[in-house]
Image (cartoon, grey):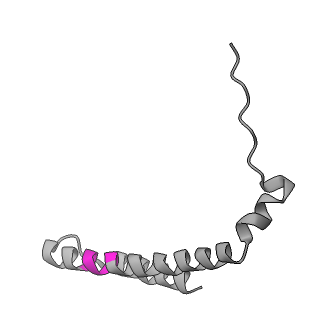
Amino acid sequence: EESSMGYDDLKTKMDALDPKDQTKFAEGLKDVAGGLEKATKGGKNALSTLKAGGLEKAMNSQKGCQVAAPSASPK
């Protein structure tokens, strides 16, 4: 939820940028870039927590989640 709120905030900031004023636009982009890093950090942390809890092993044991073997190419 924190990540989605972060992305909403970033969208609002992007929409508010004035492309006619290059200086303000560049400063705004720096702010957005910092916010993007913060927003993605939450998602990365959540994924790490899921993997640590055995999610990957559990998914790999499910028939529908297994990676199919590549088929032989026709000669």
**Was residue 29 drawn as part of the magenta stretch in this picture?**
yes
Rendered view: 19 above or below 27: above
Nearer to me, 25 or 57: 57
Rendered view: 25 above or below 73: below
Q: Where the N terminus falls, by quadrant?
A: bottom right
Left or right relative to 39: residue 61: right
The residue lying furthest to the right in this view is 63
Residue occupying image coordinates x 73% and y 48%: 67
Q: Position of residue 18 (x, y in %)?
A: 24, 75
Residue occupying image coordinates x 39% and y 76%: 37
Q: Quadrant of residue 51?
A: bottom right
Q: Main secondary structure of the magenta part?
A: helix
Q: Position of residue 74 (x, y in %)?
A: 70, 17
**Was residue 22 drawn as part of the magenta stretch in this picture?**
no
Q: Position of residue 65 (x, y in %)?
A: 78, 55
Q: Where the C terminus falls, by quadrant?
A: top right
Region of the chain picked out in magenta, as a range:
28-33
Nearer to me, 55 or 5: 55
Residue occupying image coordinates x 71% and y 35%: 70
Nearer to me, 57 or 13: 57
The residue lying furthest to the top in this view is 75
Nearer to me, 52 or 74: 52
Q: Quadrant of residue 57?
A: bottom right
Rendered view: 56 above or below 12: above
Residue occupying image coordinates x 84% and y 59%: 62
Q: Tell me how many marks there are.
A: 0
Q: Quadrant of residue 14?
A: bottom left
Q: Position of residue 54 (x, y in %)?
A: 73, 72
